Amino acid sequence: MNQMIETNTIEKLEVLVKNIPVGAAYVVNEMVCFNKEVENITGYSNNEIKTVKQWFGMLVPDDCENKYAEYKADREKGFLSRILRIKTRRGDIRQLEMAGYMSQDVEIWLIYDALARRASENSLWLNYERFRTVADYSLDWEYWCMPDGKYAYVSPVFQEITGYSVSELLEDADFIFKIALHEDKHLILHHWNNRMNSDSCMFEFRIISKSGAIKHIEHRCRKVYSPDGSWLGIKGSNKDITDRKRIEKELEAERDRAAAANAAKSLFLAKMSHEIRTPMNAVVGFASILQKTMLDEEQLDYLNNILSSSQKLLSVVNEILDISRIEAGKFEINNAPFNFAEMVSECVESLNVMSLSRGLYIEQEIDERLNRAMIGDEIRIRQIIINLVSNAIKYTMIGGVKITMKLDNEVEGKSKITIVVADTGIGIPPEDLERIFEKYVQSDSEKRLKSSGAGLGLAIVKNLLDLMGGTITVKSEYGKGSEFTAKICLDDALPVDNESAIIKSNEINGSAPVGVEASINDNRKIKLLIVDDEPSNRKLLAKMLSYKGWESEIATSGTQAIEMAAAEDHDAILMDIQMPDMDGLSAFKLIRKKLETAGRIVPPIIAVTANVMANEIEEYTNAGMHGFIPKPINIEQLHDMISGIIEHTV
């Protein structure tokens, strides 16, 4: 209860309760205070019964818990009207009728001897007068309706809410229908027609006030019965919830605007990703092919710079897409068994060229107990390690980077792992440490070095760890280096070996990544259908396939692909997705339908596309496509994918 209620209302409640000519009490925060009339009925003083719990415990000892639970249930509904059999201090059994008003902060009870009430021929009006005494103080529009539907009482707040006088409602039984919004009249009518069948109800409706303003009303009501079971009428309360509804509507509109903005951003990023990846496919692809030709030293240097810059651009595009998916809640963690130590060594080996080109060393220290199968998202953990190590290399001028992997403990099939990446680089200024994991943030050190990148790498690392239930911290001494510590918990795929040893090495000992181990018989003639509307992509794919001695045919549209697939058998079809006349997914479905109808075998159809959003990849898989190759195309990945799929479909 707030201070205002304590100081301005308690005294008024005490005066009200003490001066009511029948038993009365008020309750604030489970603390009960009753008047002399209740003391006379029960034989107990207010000093002996100070809480509602004590009330039920002392006066209803035989069924205290059940009655108290019923009271609490009534309290939640906002009503209180019940008969209690109590045992007084004198030992005699009395029946008390309790009826009252409840708000969020205060309860006011009227308490009297039920036998005495039954003795009164005018018991309805006695109950009504007691209700009115309390309801006049309510902040809501209270009413008492007779069994015949006429109002016996309406509180003064009615006029404050509606602008109409209380007498207008009392004199016209249909007045509430007249001021109700037309669309909500049926709610009131339904309540009126069912008032005999329900002891209580709650619903919302709208009215048009005298000023023309629309008001939202929350209605609650409950039947009132006499001790002998006769129906005395309906006691109800109407709360003006217009402000609450307005706020709810504003919040809903804001949520819809945010959702629309997020969807627009995701659509924009997906479009931009496709538009960037498509020309990048030609740049990276032809540059990779050019590497296989005879070049002099100067030409090779230029080519390596082209490839390096292309990879940096592609890395920025990937980071922006990752952040977008995380913010949209569409980033999923896919857990599967993998060898943790092998994965770390592969990551370090892939970064060794980068470190050597800068004259730096990479050390790794891996707890031998991590050289086993664990369950987690290998791709995302690999991304975390690569981001941390490459970031350390980028900002280290002299010395190198050390990666330490330690198994902290093993509990109930789970392994807690600490990953530490320490460098001897330029360090992070103290004022930048707290925001170093924010998006698009670069520290003073990074700005001073004019580093490339979008400032997303560390933000992605933190978001990925958050999604996997992990944490990351950093400590740094400006000018001397930084140390990032990530902690993650993975499920064990195999029983843990309790013997511990540490692998320490200043060299890179990791094995190469495991690819698709499949090779097609060299004597077999392979024929593939390339479907792509972009001339440079068609030429690039044909050249890449020729390195394996595979033949290829070209379809420049989805429609042409359907005709060519129907006219001749192919070992596999490489299908672009985004094409002007017919998208690749539709072409795939029509090819499959046409060949199946003709009783022919449907060749493997692989999506080769710059559409790489998670929902897009899922769509290809769910449709039944046999594989997915992202643009820019990696020539080794292309060969392995085709070889593996063809081998398994022979």
Image (tube, rainbow, N blue to C red):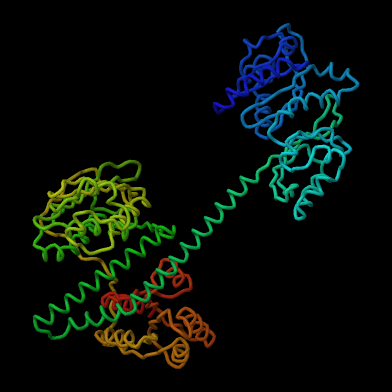
- Marker count (numbered): 0
Q: What residue is drawn where x is 86% and y is 34%?
A: 146
Quadrant location of the N terminus in the rendered image: top right
Query: Farthest front residue?
Result: 211
Q: What residue is drawn where x is 42% and y is 82%?
A: 603
592 up-or-down from 327: above or below? below
Q: What residue is drawn where x is 50% and y is 86%?
A: 595
Q: Is residue 543 left or right of residue 348?
A: right
Residue 511 location, quadrant: bottom left
Residue 163 location, quadrant: top right
Give percent across and percent down for residue 494. Answer: 31, 51
Query: Farthest bottom residue?
Result: 567
Give percent across and percent down for residue 530. Answer: 37, 86
Q: Is residue 35 left or right of residue 496?
A: right
Query: Farthest right residue?
Result: 121
Q: What residue is drawn where x is 63% and y is 24%?
A: 9
149 up-or-down from 189: above or below? above
Could you tell me if residue 173 is visible in this image? yes
Give percent across and percent down for residue 55. Answer: 66, 17
Quadrant location of the C terminus in the rendered image: bottom left
Give percent across and percent down for residue 584. Answer: 45, 80
The residue closer to the viewer here, 383 or 127, is: 127
Could you tell me if residue 367 is visible in this image? no
